[in-house]
Image (cartoon, rainbow, N blue to C red):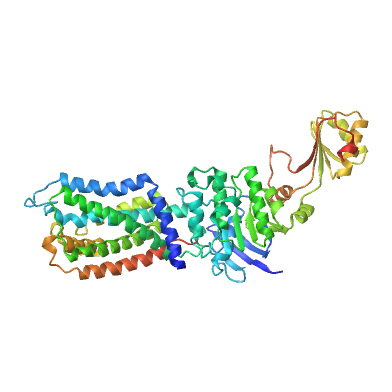
Amino acid sequence: MNEAVVASGITKRYGETQALDGVDLQVATGEVFGLIGPNGAGKTTLVRALTGTTPVDGDIRVQGVSPTDVRTDAIGLLPQSFSPPARLTARELIGYYGGLYDSARDTDALLADVGLADAADQWYETLSGGQQRRVCVAIALVNDPEILFLDEPTTGIDPAGRRSLWGLLESLAKSGTTIVLTSHSMAEVERLADRVGLLRAGQLIAVGTPETLIADHGGPSRLVCETPAAALAESALREAGFSVASGEDELVVDDVSPVDIGRAVDVLAANDIEYDSLTWTEPTLEDVYLRLTGETFAGADTPGASVVAGTSELPPAESIQ
Amino acid sequence: MSRLRRIRAESVAAARSFLRRRTAVFFTFFFPVILVVIFGALVRTQPTDGGLFAEPAAYYIPGYLATVVLFTPLSRVGSEIARHRDDNRFEKLATTPLSRSEWLIAHTLVNVVIIGVASALILGLVLVLTDATVPVTPRLAMLVPFTVLGVILFCGFGAILGRLADSQDGVIAASNTIALPLLFLSDTFIRLDQLPGWFAPLVELSPLTYYARGVRAVTYEPALGDSFGVELAVLSVLALVFFVGGALAIPRTD
């Protein structure tokens, strides 16, 4: 494998805080590598280490050389919390940063790529938060880099803008650009990344494709049934061989394949059990994240719901399948 | 060409950013104007009375010009560095071909233009509002190198301040604290013989002293016979030292 980035034993301390603790990482040329982890896990420090903007202990090679020796026209960086001069227009900002390189991408084409053609002549400070972030992404792309480091590129961007940027990043990846991106959006990483690294407390605790990580750490698929007859439903489903845990008016059936959804519905119907909703969820990268980081979430919607059935007036199980 | 292209891009962006901050533009020019109006036009001490402002009005031209040559680069470059750091712009620039010295050259160029315009304005105001006259001789052309060297020097100084201070507020406070004593104790508004004898050597330590003496030697009729070679040489060396120090002080990593 032709490695674009190779890092071994990366360690960084800020006073008493161990920001990075022996991180080993390889990113192949043309690969999209996603870094996830809680706030303070070390993602931004790792990006800074890989771009040579913070000194660290350990060895890092980017395109075979130290990050500070790599050709600057080969690197694109969007730092976290980056703000360019506020009273330049989007067009002027792209022209400014493009002017720092011997050759740069066409400003109008780049503005169109990030969906800012209509706002090109507005001052940066008058753009919405999402538009500002898109200008920042455009600035990172201005030199048409071979390796792109994006630290939370879609923070503050609305869903439509985010999808538009995802499309842009996917097209860059298809054309062979190596991308290292950090994100708190699991959907973003799951969609874009060929491989994902999960950082916790400065350590890279899991690396793999999204599918591998989900299979290894995501836990079982689940069917959640909201019903006023939870006890009765639990008993019926147990008798049918399901693994069930119940709460006051909800029960959770673990390890339910898509085929088993229909069987579970049939069991409920056969026992005249009414229910308010049935929700089937597959494990997602978010489940991997929550399991491996030990974080919990309260009051959040069930992540990764892939089938949401309505009430007991559902069509027969066969049609759900 | 690449270097010129980078410096041009950086200086055009810096100039646009400055010119679009109307408050900054207004006070950059208003501050020295108010000084000229107060000290040159309102405080009209007679030359024979002694004390402050006892010399002919033209004697104080270096002092008036020093307000912009000293204050503007110190506060502007210093706060620009603090702003760049707060917005993670240096982290971004570190991955571009723009070097630290190119960044400082670009911002120094912008300051040279701003301060050149402000200096012309001040000089005009002094001539209009006071009875000062400036003899037009070939020596007067030396005002340009003295001003440029002064700006380079204090841009470098401002870069060092920007590195040392941890915020824009800190830069402003530090630059005022440094600039105000320098402005009055560098052979500008107060003659050496008005200061305690023990203080005179300290005046020699101020970089602004060489700017003030050099400018006086080319703009003040009684001083036209004075040599300005030493002042120009010292100012050149100090400008180089502070520029290099300032360029090295500009942050490239966290």
Whether residue B29 is visible:
yes
Residue drawn where x is 71% and y is 38% of the image = A301
Q: Is residue B32 left or right of residue A24?
A: left
Residue A131 found in image quarter: top right
Q: Is B247 located above or below residue A286 in the figure?
A: below
Q: Nearer the viewer, residue A113 or B183?
A: A113
Q: Nearer the viewer, residue B235 or A138?
A: A138
Circle count: 0
Residue drawn where x is 33% and y is 68% of the image = B240
Q: Is B168 located above or below residue A234 in the figure?
A: below
Q: Which corner quadrant holds the C terminus of chain A?
A: top right
Q: Is residue A255 left or right of residue B38?
A: right
Residue A198 found in image quarter: bottom right
The x and y percentages for residue A76 are 57, 60
The x and y percentages for residue B60 are 17, 55
Q: Is residue A5 left or right of residue B213?
A: right
The x and y percentages for residue A216 are 78, 54
